[in-house]
Image (spheres, rainbow, N blue to C red):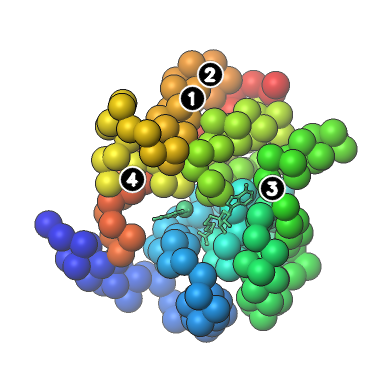
Amino acid sequence: MSRELWSEVDEYICGHLLADDPDLARAAAASDAAGLPPIAVTANQGKLLELLTRIHKAKRVLELGTLGGYSTIWLARGVGVDGTVVTLELDPDYAALAGENIARAALAERVDLRVGPALETLAAMHKAGEGAFDLIFIDADKQSYPAYLEWSLKLSRAGTVLIGDNVVRSGGILDPTSEDGVIRGVRRFYELLADEPRVDATAIQMVGAKGHDGFALGIVSAPS
Ligand code: SAH
Ligand code: DHB
Ligand code: MG
């Protein structure tokens, strides 16, 4: 098995099940052209985010880590015309491009893009009594996943769906001695999830155009 094969299978899946999508293609192309790192979710992963949002009938979604707004567009489609996605991004240049991509996809009215360190924005949101969110997609810096889980719970209700990206890292999570902040953050995220009685969770490995990684999926069983 190889990444080349996994990419071909992703192309097969997307070719069969995902319609041509000029808005998403343009967002991806503009992100590439602007030199953003190629780390957005794949199209079939994005579609999974949209479907989970629709299955859960989520109307208020929170995303941590916007990048060029590619996953944001999928989530914004998922919430429908009467829904909102609040998305948090540290980098003002990425956020500006994301704003353009989202506007070109005619989704600006559903998306509330906030620039700054997510930990600060989350604290301000909590202080302002924002929430509860129906679904939270955690995809910003992996070092902070443990803290993002705590803040996500504060912005949750019983029934909130939590999704975490990048929770396998090619199996890197298996190394308990790793000094890589990403691995340490993701491992701590699992430990917190395991010890957290308010969340019932699993994680699924994925292979595809982005290599070997995975999504964690959980449901909050009780409000904080
Ligand atoms: N969700 C996007 C990919 C996000 S990549 C998609 O799939 O399309 C991770 C993003 O998190 C990057 O854009 C990075 O700038 C942002 N990020 C990193 N540290 C952050 C922080 N402290 N607060 C908010 N965003 C952060
Ligand atoms: C990487 C991938 C991601 O999906 C992400 O959110 C951050 C980094 C990566 O492969 O480096
Ligand atoms: Mg990611």
Q: Residue at x 66, y 55 (%)?
A: 90
Q: Are marks 1 and 2 in contact (CB under 8 Å)?
A: yes
Q: Is residue 147 left or right of residue 209?
A: right
Mark 2 highlights which residue?
196
Q: Is residue 130 left or right of residue 10?
A: right
Which quadrant holds the N terminus? bottom left
Amino acid type shown at disc 1: Leu
Mark 1 or 4: in front is 4
Of the residues under marks 4 and 2, which one precedes in the sequence? 4
Mark 4 highlights which residue?
169
Amino acid type shown at disc 2: Glu
Residue 157 placement: quadrant: top right
Can residue 111 be seen here? The reply is yes
Label 4 Cα crowd, 10 Å radius (few <14 / some 14-19 / many 20+): some
Mark 3–mark 4 distance (CA, rounded to whole Å):
23 Å
Q: Is residue 164 left or right of residue 15?
A: right
Q: Residue at x 69, y 40 (%)?
A: 119
Label 3 Cα crowd, 10 Å radius (few <14 / some 14-19 / many 20+): some
Question: Which circle marks residue 117 in the picture?
Answer: 3
Is 32 above or below relative to 91?
Answer: below
Q: Secondary structure at mark 2?
A: loop
Q: Is mark 4 within 8 Å of ligand 2?
A: yes
Q: Nearer the viewer, residue 177 or 160?
A: 177
Amino acid type shown at disc 3: Pro
Of the residues under marks 2 and 3, which one precedes in the sequence? 3
Q: Is mark 2 within 8 Å of ligand 3?
A: no
Of the residues under marks 1 and 3, which one precedes in the sequence? 3
Q: Is mark 1 within 8 Å of ligand 3?
A: no
